[in-house]
Image (spheres, rainbow, N blue to C red):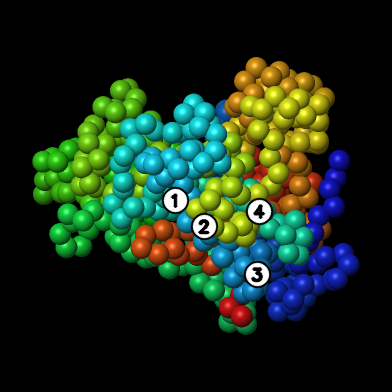
Amino acid sequence: MRLAAFDEMLPEISGLRKPYSAYDRWLKEQDPARLTEKMQDAERVFRKTGITFAVYGEQEASERLIPFDIVPRIISGNEWRRLTQGIEQRVQALNAFLDDIYHRQEILRAGRVPKELIARNEAFLPEMIGVRPPAGVYTHIIGVDIVRISENEFYVLEDNARTPSGVSYMLENRETMMQLFPELFQQIKVRPVENYPQLLRQSLAAVRPQSTKGAPTIAVLTPGSFNSAYFEHAFLADQMGVQLVEGQDLRVVDGHVAMRTTEGYKQIDVLYRRVDDSFLDPLTFRPDSALGVPGIMDVYRAGNITIANAPGTGIADDKAIYSYMPEIVEFYTGRKAILGNIPTWRCSEPDSLKYVLEHIDELVVKEVHGSGGYGMLVGPAATKKECEDFSKKLAAKPSNYIAQPTLALSTCPILTDKGLAPRHVDLRPYVLVSDRIQIVPGGLTRVALKEGSLVVNSSQGGGTKDTWVLDD
């Protein structure tokens, strides 16, 4: 089944959209051979830089180059202002929800979110009950995945409140485009994204513990070079001018977390961690973890270190909780959600499960804790046997799944051997939260490179584009 989709550059009815007018004029003047050559140049840049992504479950080529398309996705200034209002509202609600869930739990007492959805959720950390992070911020870095259905319809696909990845690709995409097509950026006013590392460092510094004296020491905690996003961990540490550390480099010294240096151990005030909750502290969570720091949770509870994002934030991006986001936004902001949710069936509910099982070939079914496009079924693109096999998994553990309709995601052109061709896209803007909320103008556009595919994840063969927000 092929869905009719809104093309962001060339809708069938209205023709060329205004945000693309200047780019289209430039494009028509280009020699196709030059563009093909530029695509090859971009691939060489990415290969030289080492921008790869791990593809799990494959024996060959587990480290792959991120496919990059040189046709930018262009968003007008007005469109971006509407989006940022909705994103900011949602991020405020997410932080308020986390603070409430780990303290007074008013939303549960009000019956707006079921208690059992929290109590039985593996992403909820009882160890965080009563703990308030420095500056009261839980989700310091958030990636909000947004899809577009028509000229004026945008929906949130999911919230990434734990450790959202991909920002390094956003930055490298822009740098590559500026190298390849400097004349374009002279002709078209595009809002910058390259100051993100500086904004990230400033934002992290603003949420340092109250006990910090002078400028805070910041570090990035990585699980190590085997991790699929290691390139990004090293990239961001380098761009911010801070240390990249592993658990073995850290220890608790006099009630603080300190990192090993050539001059002895140095206290860390803010730790941007890219390690999952369960591996963060072997004394509190998994005792077999070699990735975390023994005792770091005691330091955290004492208020002597900021961990970004805070432990326990995963409850805010759980896909079952996602289905309650319209209620959550209204509960904490007093206003209807500006950005809507995609209709969602919670398979833990018998009536919903029955509907999903009967219509599984029409729906997208996802694991509530899944990410990267793994553990999901796109019904219209699946075989009858795949649907039958997935139905068995679903029936065996319904609370592990949610389902959504198959939407006609908007398309943007990519450059192929035969010229421009539409492909489905989504958008992940990046949000920084400290004493204020900052949203980088654009974000990461992920594109399904296979014709007709709706799966944009890099781990599933998707690629990326530079995202332009016009300065108009």
Q: Where does label 1 land, which residue?
A: 96
The x, y position of residue 202, in whole percent, is 33, 64
Q: Is residue 124 above or below residue 165?
A: above
Measured in 3D between alpha carbons, the distance from the residue under mark 4 to the one under mark 2, in whole angstroms, is: 15 Å
Query: Is the C-beta separation of discs 4 and 1 under 8 Å?
Result: no
Q: Secondary structure at mark 1?
A: helix
Give the number of the disc on residue 333: 2
Q: Where does label 3 land, which residue?
A: 79
Q: Amino acid at mark 2?
A: Thr
Q: Amino acid at mark 1?
A: Ala
The x, y position of residue 2, in whole percent, is 85, 45
Closer to the chain start, of discs 4 and 1, is 1
Q: Amino acid at mark 3?
A: Glu
Evaluate whether residue 323 shows in this view.
Answer: yes
Closer to the chain start, of discs 3 and 2, is 3
- Residues 103 and 13: in front is 103
Image quadrant of residue 71? bottom right
Closer to the chain start, of discs 3 and 4, is 3
Query: Is the C-beta separation of discs 2 and 1 under 8 Å?
Result: yes
Other-residue count near label 1 (Cα within 10 Å), few / some / many at <14 / 14–19 / ≥20:
some
Q: Where does label 4 land, which residue?
A: 340
Other-residue count near label 2 (Cα within 10 Å), few / some / many at <14 / 14–19 / ≥20:
some
Mark in the foreground, 3 or 2: 2
Measured in 3D between alpha carbons, the distance from the residue under mark 3 to the one under mark 2, in whole angstroms, is: 22 Å
**Apparent side of residue 87 relative to residue 346 in the rendered image (left or right):** left
Image quadrant of residue 400? top right
Image quarter (top left, top right, bottom left or bottom right) of the N terminus: top right
